Each structure stands twice: as C-alpha cells, then as structure tokens.
Image (cartoon, rainbow, N blue to C red):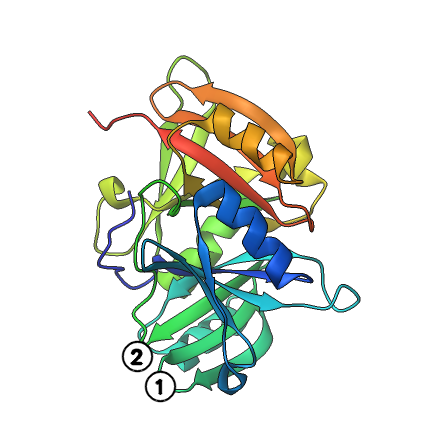
C-alpha cells in the first residue's frame, strides 16, 4: 500500500473542486467526520479538510459553468518543470503551467494520452497529506482508461512507475497495479482499469478515482445517501482485497469507499 513517506511518483495530495464548499463540508463532515479549515485570500480561498487535526485533502470553489465538480489526485515530483517536460514529450498535455503556492510547494495540472486529468505536487513547506490509510482518509488511486498498456507506458515515462499484473482471487480477471520506481509491488498505490470493464465509470470518460478508507462500506454508502449523495457502484467484495463501492456527492464528484482486508 501507499508509503506514508511519499516516494517520488506516489500520490501525495487530493483535492475537491465543487460549486458549494459549505455544502461539500457538510456532506463530507457527516460521512467522514472531516472539518473545513477555510482558506484566505492569499491562496484564493483554497481550504483544507482535516480529520482529528490532520489534513486529508484540499477544497476549492469551482463555478458550475466553468467545470464539473470532481476530485483530483496529485503525484509527487522532485522537480515539477522536468515532470512537465516529460508529460508533453510522452504525448500528454499541460492543463495549467506549474505555479508557486506561496512557500507550500509548486503545483501543475496535466492530462495523459487519453485525456485523464492528474495533478503534480512538488512539496516545500507542505509535504502532502497528513494522514492516509486510516478510516476517513485517502487509501488508493485508480485510473479508468481506454488503453491500460498505453497508460502504463505513459506514466512509466513520466514518473518511472512499475506496473504489475494481479490476478483477482477466484476469478480470471487481471488487475494492473502500479508502484513507484525503486520499490516493490508491496508499495503499490493504485491500479489501472480498462474503462469498459466498469460501465458506470466508463460513462465519465478517462479519469482518476480516489478511494477513501472506511470501517463499514455498506454503512458509509447508506450515510452518503442520507446526506444527499448517491451510489454509482453498489458494495462489492473482492476476494483477497476487500469491500468497496463508488459514491457520488451531492454536487457530482465521484469517489470510492473501501474497507481493505487485513494484509496477510
């Protein structure tokens, strides 16, 4: 699973773009126990979600006419300008040029070969998420793409990721996991999925999906519905992995819930 030390190339940040920051705070506060720390003018109102005092992600207001509500996943880079060059050289595009965020770090937004958006964070004073893999925090990243081998090559060129096939216990399905360069499969932080394998996600086009850990997936889905969200993929138990479900928040942002099985 994801290494809390955030090796280069691993996800180290997530944030939510939403048309209603206060409404999103109410939803995620009820679902995960998050608290909103509003951002000041110096960061354009960019706020933080925290859990027991630890940062679990960021949040920013996005006008509905400008962009759809969505979660974004950021991957760590030691030098974001070099990463930006690798993205374009490998066939991706820059959504916005790398920029300084005070003394917190540098960030950039990009799309891969298929058009899936992802962020890059070069940490300075802000190293990344304050808690991971605990209930209510980031757990896993998943890319839905039309071409898994092409996506694996692209991210290998950009971040040095290594891809590994993982046969799902009791089935013929092979899931592709990814882990940072210089590490082994035990530090896999995400997976690559052919979009057509999951019609509910295929309808959204190529995209990254963040997973958040919960103690009880069924109870969390029920809570999300009570809070105004919806279920896009019902709870399913994957042998040897855990129980998971996909949820849509009241403003259209999609994310996944997961209770992983204890590692053997």
**How packed is label 2: few (under 14 Cα within 10 Å), some, or many (20 or more)?**
some
For label 2, the residue is 124
Q: Secondary structure at mark 1?
A: loop
Do tag 1 and tag 2 residues touch (Cβ < 8 Å)? yes
Q: Secondary structure at mark 2?
A: loop
Where's residue 30, x and y in %? Answer: 51, 44
For label 1, the residue is 103
Q: Is residue 209 visible?
A: no
Q: Is residue 44 above or below residue 140?
A: below
Assign the N terminus to one quadrant of the image: top left
Where's residue 235, x and y in %? Answer: 53, 24
Q: Is residue 260 above or below residue 11?
A: above
Which residue is painted at 45% across and 49% down in the image? 152
As drawn, is 92 to the left or to the right of 81? right
Q: Earlier in the sequence, mark 1 or mark 2?
A: 1
Where's residue 103, x and y in %? Answer: 35, 86
Which residue is painted at 43% across and 33% down in the image? 258
As drawn, is 94 to the left or to the right of 34? right
Instruction: Kindly identify which numbered label has been placed on residue 121.
Output: none
């Amino acid at each position: 699973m994801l290494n809390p030390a955030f090796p280069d190339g691993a996800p180290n940040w997530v944030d939510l773009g939403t048309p209603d920051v206060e409404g999103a705070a109410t939803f995620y506060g009820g679902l995960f126990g998050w608290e909103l720390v509003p951002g000041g003018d110096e960061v354009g109102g960019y706020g933080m979600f925290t859990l027991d005092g630890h940062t679990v992600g960021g949040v920013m207001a996005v006008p509905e006419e400008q962009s759809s509500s969505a979660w974004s996943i950021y991957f760590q880079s030691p030098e974001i300008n070099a990463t930006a060059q690798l993205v374009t050289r490998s066939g991706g595009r820059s959504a916005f040029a790398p920029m300084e965020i005070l003394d917190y770090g540098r960030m950039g937004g990009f799309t891969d070969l298929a058009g899936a958006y992802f962020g890059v964070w070069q940490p300075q004073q802000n190293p990344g998420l304050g808690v991971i893999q605990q209930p209510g925090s980031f757990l896993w990243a998943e890319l839905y793409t039309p071409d898994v081998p092409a996506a694996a090559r692209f991210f290998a060129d950009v971040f040095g990721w290594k891809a590994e096939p993982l046969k799902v216990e009791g089935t013929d399905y092979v899931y592709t996991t990814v882990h940072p360069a210089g590490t082994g499969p035990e530090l896999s932080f995400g997976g690559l999925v052919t979009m057509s394998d999951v019609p509910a996600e295929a309808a959204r086009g190529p995209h990254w999906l963040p997973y958040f850990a919960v103690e009880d997936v069924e109870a969390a889905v029920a809570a999300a519905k009570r809070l105004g969200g919806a279920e896009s993929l019902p709870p399913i138990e994957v042998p040897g992995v855990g129980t998971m479900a996909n949820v849509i928040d009241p403003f259209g942002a999609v994310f996944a819930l997961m209770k992983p099985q204890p590692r053997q």
